[in-house]
Amino acid sequence: TNRRRAALEEARMNKDLQAAGSLRTQLTNLFRLAINKAYPDLTDEPVVAACNNPKFGDYQCNNAMQLFAKLKGKEGAPKAPRDVASALVANLPPNELLSETSLAGPGFINIRLSNEFLSKRVSEMLKLGLQPPFSPDLSSKKCVVDFSSPNVAKEMHVGHLRSTIIGDTICRTLELCGAQVLRLNHIGDWGTQFGMLIQHMSELTPSADGGATGDESISDLMELYRAAKKRFDEDEGFKQRAREAVTALQSGDEKSLRMWRAICAASRKEFAAIYERLGVRVEERGESFYNPMLKAVVEELKEKGCAEESDGAICVFVEGQSIPLIVQKSDGGFGYASTDMAAIKHRLEVEKADWIIYVTDAGQAQHFDLVFSAAKKAGWIGTPESKAKIDHVGFGLVLGEDGKKFKTRSGDVVRLVELLDEAKARCTDTIRTRSQETGETVDEASLEHAASAMGYGAVKYADLKSHRMTNYKFSFDSMLDLKGNTAVYLLYAHARIAGIARKAEKDIDALAASTPIVVAHQREVDLALHLSRFPEAMEDMLQELTPNRLTDYLYELSERFNAFYVDCKVLGSEEEGSRLQLVEATARVMRQCFSLLGLIPLYRI
Ligand code: ARG
């Protein structure tokens, strides 16, 4: 981060355009100066946004109406909001960004950026590399992202897949902004289910390890879990023995611990296989990690008067919530909520997190609301000493093509491994067919590489592209569509674009150093503007923690490129030197987006 800060400082001193911030930030800064100069008494923050209709401008500033309302009645007050708008325009400091402004409606200011400015900005992206946004400044921040978090002895389901994919993209975006990110896998590796399981297994196999070897497949474990649960519900005697088994485990009984470790190890293998395929890195720190802290946390909450007894349980009541957070159950046991209280405290006090993000299904929103409020009540957050930001990133359901809960034909949970296998197999077919059509041969190794990149990429992209709160239908046909807004389409598009630069046989870096970019044709302007807006897409994504901001940006980029490529001849044209740089900048921005989305770029398919 020091190196980055130094580079940023240097860039600022040299007045590099990117270092001044995203286009929106730069325009906001200009209008701040204008407001200040025109109306020194008012401190309104400028509201600058992209124009909805590009016919009118690239951006617009919408402050005039509100400023007018504030000035009304004062001496020398303007007669209409439009006068305020004109005054703002007249007070804009000299700058190289704007080519023209116009007024619209009651007092909107439409802004058109200058082509020279856009050209320079893209040229700089090639020369200096792509800069992530500098606001929010995350360069020295510690972020904890709690994501994926499947449960031991249970199948990892599509909900966990969503958490894994969304969480990974959030981590990658924070990392690109220079944050120090702790990726935590809060797996469900503790709790009453282990009592049932251990008791059932040791009754089946009366040996020292209770039949737990660590080599069980997830389906074995699921089978055992189901049988144990059935007995637990039907057989009072077993229920009692299972409860005792939990106590034995929690008090550190050797055999119980051994069995527990073996069961965790077996599940871990299954999880690891998924992460490996998806290229996702996450550090395991499951619920059991916080077990030694639970008692003290509940004590602290009681001492501070945050928690009280209610019907034998220890509860934290939170204003505006109908149900309390139960931090200790009436039988004295600790549960999911107790663990999350210990975890949040640990992350704040030991990990010194500036930002904690939890990625789970939207169904857990209330749970996290309670946890965050309880942490506030305890004074762990929201104090002058602890201003950490905390967010729950919820997401909707994955549905089958029939619009119902995603299941196999026989009604079972869909196994993620099989899902990924199928995506890859279908991509292998697609690539084979395409190569037969084009007559280009692909060797087995490239086929393997391309099929995984496409297949796994398609699953990820389909998940990320819909707003995370909406439910989406899992459909191989639509996610593997060669023409729609899919990873397959975008990976092909990138390969084509990379191919143009390759065919030109030019050293693009040398070209960037020697040849200015000139954008003149409307399609060039459209493309250059969109390229320059990449930091804004990241800003929006960080603001809302919605990865679809990135996919929307990426898809639009490919569309603008297509429009450019149809209308503007590149190879062999007079403008070749300039246009090749636009081609290369497009390819680089696409790759940066791919990298944030966890997609692997392909250069030839
Ligand atoms: N294991 C939980 C589940 O499967 C998700 C855990 C999320 N993280 C947390 N700190 N509660 O739903």
Image (cartoon, helix red, strand yellow):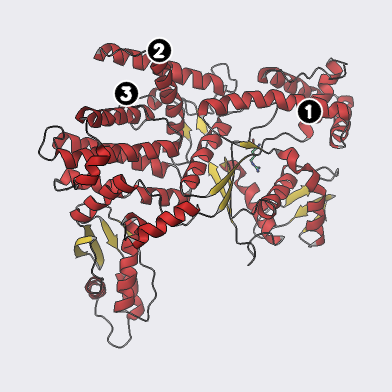
Counting from the top left corner in percent of width and height, residue 343 is at 70, 47
* Residue picked out by circle 1: 260
Front residue (pair 344, 407)? 344
Front residue (pair 514, 67)? 514
Cβ–Cβ below 8 Å for labels 1 and 3?
Answer: no
Name the mark nearer the viewer: 2 or 1: 2
On the rendering, which quadrant does ligand 1 occupy?
top right
Q: Residue at x 43, y 17 (%)?
A: 448
Describe residue 366's horizontal placement relative to residue 583 as left or right.
right
**Residue 582 visible within the image:** no
Counting from the top left corner in percent of width and height, residue 123 is at 26, 48
Q: Which quarter shows the C terminus? A: top left
Q: Which mark is residue 444?
A: 2
Q: Residue at x 82, y 26 (%)?
A: 258
Position of residue 231 relative to residue 289, above or below, is above
Amino acid on which the number 3 mark rests in the picture: Arg
Q: Residue at x 64, y 54 (%)?
A: 352
Q: Which mark is residue 604?
A: 3
Amino acid on which the number 1 mark rests in the picture: Trp
Is the CB of the residue bearing disc 2 within 8 angstroms of ligand 1? no
Q: How far apart are the alpha carbons under marks 2 and 3? A: 14 Å
Amino acid on which the number 2 mark rests in the picture: Glu
